[in-house]
């Protein structure tokens, strides 16, 4: 539904105006804060599992892993609270704000758009289409490799956090059940770590696609995530 | 008249003085403070003795070995005299039919009153034929004995989780107690073996206070399994500082640095080793220079190497950990992007040429 309406809007607007307001300020702000938090989480997380070589000197004078873990937990809170705020905005924001949380799976036209985008990325289509919000392919990717995974990371992350926070802490009450469910603390660590790699793979594809589409497609991409306005090139 | 614990102890030749010492020791080891000592004494003096039946399934008897090495001879004597009076096929004097008759007797006389302590677990394959006692499968004996019990204690990782006999592929289908017994409070006391003082602490708590200690989500007493090894480890300062042993005989190992990179499972293991230690507080694995292997965690045999930090995830085959799987995914993605970008550039150049050529 969304994408069809989107295309119609795009075509209509494309003829009359050259730009349209898509991403509201909270979405844009969240995007960049979230991206920064994730970079910190991935780097610090990597070193939590495989710490850098030992630091010289006395233990009392150093706090390297302590700081790495602190940065991870701080960024983890930013990430989690940001995600909650983003869910709230999906409820009150414009319809583009809901795209990464809901897929119009029952809409056949949407699926054919996904297929079209797939063909476009496989070099089987010569001319790209115009979209006001996310293109359907991007929406699909974001839903599975960002939204679902993000919740997974928050749930496993706070389950691990509860081990340090202790029994009876809020994270233990809310997420402590995850540990036995996944087969114990060690397993939860392993899945959380695997999640990091999958997220990073998503980011690689995402940033590549954003830059590529910015160049190749008939609309603006990166500047849209900065200013909120979608510019159409033709 | 039914005997009290105190009567039994006196009959065993334990002096009142020793008895009171035991009460204060127990109060301390349970973390209850000295005020609880008179309460324990009073309870033991007035309460009728609760019989304990100690069963052995598929096991190596390390739990019993640990138990009888309890730090304080006093604790050992007292607790053992509470226990061995009834049934423990390893420790008791009776044998054969005479021994088996004790179970029947306790079941009848103390219906719903006695405690069953299980060491080891029942194998279920081939109708339980992998563990036969008194001519029949252990699983039958276990179920019958537990039927009229007040509560059940699962000693060690075998009874709590399955341990080595349940490690993949688990040919005998060794199964933890809580998966075959239901409708009774079951206390899991994991460890391979559990610490002696943890075991005596749990028994004494249940006998004196007549209730099950507070348990966590996995049925373990919170007072002993509420924290990880890592939370109380004396090498934790080196962990936070970022100082690790990188090989067994390197400078870091000699300096007593953290064993995290040598695969220490302290950060993922719930047990009391780092605070109570072993053998009467003499030492414990990390203090002896070897990482924790996570012996009190569910399925610890099947969680990859004892010497890796980022360890295997079994779902992806024998030799795959998160970094191997995830790193491969990321590398393939990166390569695909590079290829895609190259093709894009080519296609774009060609279409430009076409446009120019027109
Ligand atoms: C995009 C999101 C995240 C990524 C990529 C990420 C990544 C990682 C990685 C790679 C590890 C190391 C795992 C290991 O080898 O054992 C880790 C550990 C951990 N993460 Fe995250 N994480 C994320 C979100 C979170 C969140 C939201 C929290 C919640 C506060 C969190 C809390 C933790 C904790 C408590 C640990 C264990 C630390 C320790 O064992 O000392 N993470 N994370
Ligand atoms: C850790 C890094 C990043 C993550 C997790 C991430 C995640 C996301 C998500 C979830 C969205 C959907 C936003 C929404 O609908 O609410 C999005 C959109 C977008 N992101 Fe990122 N992003 C990251 C980095 C970047 C970078 C570095 C760029 C710039 C090159 C970028 C460019 C964009 C653009 C242009 C869009 C809008 C796409 C469209 O209009 O269809 N992102 N990103
Ligand atoms: S030696 Fe093991 S338990 Fe101790 S601080 Fe290091 S990782 Fe934690
Ligand atoms: S230190 Fe770890 S492996 Fe060793 S006995 Fe304690 S819980 Fe078991």
Image (tube, rainbow, N blue to C red):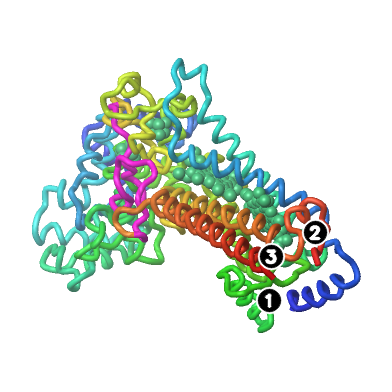
**Chain that bears disc 1:** A
Residue where numbered disc 3 is placed: B356
Q: How dense is the environment of label 2, judged by Cα within 10 Å: few (below 14), some, or many (20 and up)?
A: many
Q: Is residue B67 left or right of residue B38?
A: left
Residue toward you, B15 or B151: B151
Question: Which segment is the magenta one?
Answer: B288-316
Q: Residue B339: image x %, image y %?
A: 50, 58
Marks 2 & 3, CB-CB < 8 Å contact: no
Q: Main secondary structure of the magenta part?
A: loop
Residue pushed farthest right? Answer: A16
Nearer the observer: mark 2 or 3; the answer is 3
C-alpha gap between disc 1 and disc 3: 41 Å
Q: Label 3 CB, ligand 2: below 8 Å?
A: no
Q: Between marks 2 and 3, how big is the CA–CA gap?
A: 37 Å
Numbered badge on residue A23: 2
**Residue plotted at (26% across, 41% down):** B8
Q: Residue A103: give x, y in percent of width and height.
A: 66, 72
Disc 1: which residue: A104
Kindly identify which chain the residue marked by label 3 belongs to.
Answer: B
Which quarter of the picture shows residue A111? Answer: bottom right
Indicate the quadrant where residue B281 lies: top left
């Amino acid at each position: 539904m969304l994408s069809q309406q989107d295309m119609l809007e795009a075509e209509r607007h494309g003829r009359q105006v050259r730009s349209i307001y898509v991403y509201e300020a909270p979405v844009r702000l969240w995007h960049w804060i979230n991206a920064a938090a994730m970079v910190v989480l991935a780097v610090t997380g990597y070193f939590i599992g495989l710490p850098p070589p030992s630091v010289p000197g006395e233990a009392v004078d150093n706090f390297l892993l302590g700081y790495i873990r602190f940065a991870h937990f701080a960024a983890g809170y930013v990430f989690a609270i940001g995600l909650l705020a983003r869910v709230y905005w999906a409820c009150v924001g414009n319809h583009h704000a809901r795209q990464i949380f809901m897929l119009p799976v029952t809409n056949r036209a949407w699926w054919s758009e996904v297929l079209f985008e797939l063909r476009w990325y496989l070099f089987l289509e010569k001319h790209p289409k115009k979209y006001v919000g996310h293109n359907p392919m991007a929406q699909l990717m974001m839903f599975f490799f960002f939204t679902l995974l993000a919740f997974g990371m928050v749930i496993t992350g706070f389950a691990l956090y509860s081990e340090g926070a202790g029994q009876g802490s809020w994270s233990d009450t809310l997420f402590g059940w995850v540990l036995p469910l996944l087969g114990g603390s060690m397993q939860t660590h392993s899945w959380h770590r695997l999640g990091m790699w999958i997220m990073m793979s998503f980011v690689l594809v995402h940033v590549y696609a954003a830059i590529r589409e910015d160049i190749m497609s008939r609309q603006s991409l990166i500047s849209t995530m900065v200013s909120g306005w979608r510019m159409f090139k033709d | 008249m039914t005997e009290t614990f105190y009567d039994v102890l006196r009959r065993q030749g334990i002096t009142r003085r020793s008895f009171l010492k035991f009460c204060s020791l127990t109060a301390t080891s349970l973390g209850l403070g000295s005020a609880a000592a008179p309460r324990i004494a009073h309870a033991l003096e007035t309460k009728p003795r609760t019989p304990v039946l100690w069963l052995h399934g598929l096991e190596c008897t390390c739990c019993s070995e640990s138990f009888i090495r309890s730090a304080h001879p006093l604790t050992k004597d007292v607790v053992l005299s509470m226990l061995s009076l009834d049934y423990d096929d390893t420790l008791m004097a009776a044998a054969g039919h005479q021994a088996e008759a004790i179970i029947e007797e306790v079941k009848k006389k103390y219906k719903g009153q006695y405690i069953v302590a299980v060491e080891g677990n029942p194998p279920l394959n081939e109708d339980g034929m992998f563990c036969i006692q008194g001519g029949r499968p252990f699983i039958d004996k276990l179920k019958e004995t537990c039927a009229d019990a007040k509560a059940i204690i699962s000693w060690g990782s075998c009874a709590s989780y399955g341990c080595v006999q349940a490690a993949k592929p688990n040919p005998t289908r060794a199964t933890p107690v809580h998966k075959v017994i239901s409708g009774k409070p079951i206390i899991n006391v994991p460890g391979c073996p559990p610490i002696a003082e943890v075991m005596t602490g749990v028994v004494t708590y249940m006998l004196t206070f007549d209730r099950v200690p507070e348990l966590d989500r996995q049925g373990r007493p919170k007072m002993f399994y509420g924290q990880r090894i890592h939370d109380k480890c004396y090498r934790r300062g080196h962990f936070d500082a970022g100082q690790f042993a990188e090989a067994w005989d390197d400078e870091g190992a000699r300096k007593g640095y953290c064993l995290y990179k040598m695969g220490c499972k302290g950060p993922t293991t719930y047990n009391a080793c780092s605070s109570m230690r072993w053998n009467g507080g003499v030492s414990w694995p990390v203090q002896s220079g070897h990482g924790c292997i996570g012996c009190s965690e569910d399925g610890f045999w099947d969680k990859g190497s004892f010497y890796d930090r980022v360890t295997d995830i079994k779902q992806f085959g024998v030799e795959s950990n998160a970094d191997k799987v995830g790193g491969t995914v990321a590398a393939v993605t990166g390569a695909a992007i590079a290829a895609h970008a190259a093709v894009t550039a080519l296609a774009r150049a060609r279409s430009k040429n076409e446009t120019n050529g027109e």
